Amino acid sequence: MRWSLSLCALVAACSPRPSANPPTSPTPVPSTSVSGSSVASSAPAGPDAWLTDPAMIAAGRALFGNNCSPCHKADGSGLIGPNLTDSAWLHGGSPEQIETTILKGWPDKGMVAWGTMLTPHQIRTLVAFVVSIKDTNVPGGKAPQAAP
Ligand code: HEC
């Protein structure tokens, strides 16, 4: 699958020291974070932690306001481009699918390919932001353009 290949490349590009910290290594965790526990963890560790990292989301929100709001509105509820706060996705609403959409765009449909204009890290902040607003159903948002 193409997106998984590009995602791998992205992960490698994002990591400052790709081999220094293999995800499977039993790194000691702070005493407040219990591995495998789903309770009382405000900042889950793990390979997907960036997705819910408040700093990533905040950075993504700022970038979104600059680059994406003309078509998706600053709150993501849709304008020329689709509403990103509903549960209907033309191209899939998983983090990987959203990442692929932002990276490669859908140029023939009016969605810009941002992979050549933004860094992989910036793209990830945008993914974190979009994931954070999906399913929030901002009032007055554009009508769904796909089946949920
Ligand atoms: C020039 C207008 C335009 C800009 C700017 C734009 N988009 Fe889009 N975007 C679109 C259009 C149009 C679509 C729908 C494409 C389609 O119909 O297949 C879309 C689709 C998407 C989708 C997929 C939605 C779905 O239902 O699957 C995501 C995610 C998205 N854009 C994110 C972004 C982000 C993040 C940015 C800023 C970095 C951005 N867009 C900037 C026009 C734009």
Image: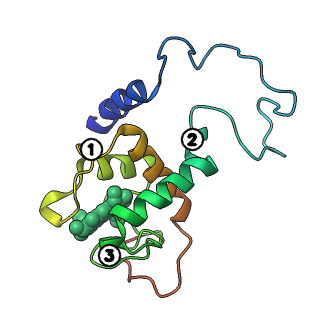
Q: Residue 141, image x and y in percent?
A: 44, 82
Is any part of residue 30 visible from this angle?
yes
Residue type, numbered disc 3: Gln
Q: Position of residue 147 (x, y in %)?
A: 37, 71
The residue shown at (22%, 52%) is 113
Count neighbours of disc 1 (C-alpha within 10 A) and say few if under 14, some if 14 to 19, many if 20 or more: some
Q: Quadrant of the N terminus?
A: top left
Q: Can you name the residue that lies furthest to the bottom here?
A: 140
Mark 1: which secondary structure? loop
How far apart marks 1 and 2 lie (CA) works out to 19 Å
- Residue at 23% x, 62% y is 111
| Residue 68 percent across, percent down from the top left | 34, 65
Residue at left 38%, top 27%? 13
Point out the tag, 3 or 2, that comes first from the N-terminus.
2
Distance in Å between CA atoms under marks 3 and 1: 24 Å
Disc 3 is placed on an element classified as loop
Q: In the image, which is nearer the foreground, mark 3 or mark 2?
A: 2
Asked if the beta carbon under badge 3 is closer than 8 A to the nearest atom of ligand 1, the reply is yes
Q: Give the residue pinned by disc 3.
A: 145
Ligand 1: image quarter? bottom left
For the image, the number of numbered tags is 3
Q: Nearer the viewer, mark 3 or mark 1?
A: 1
The reply to whether dot 3 and dot 1 touch (C-beta < 8 Å) is no
Q: Is residue 94 visible?
A: no
Q: Earlier in the sequence, mark 3 or mark 1?
A: 1
What is the number of the mark on residue 50? 2
- Relative side of 129 to 46, left or right: left
Quadrant in the rendering for residue 118: top left
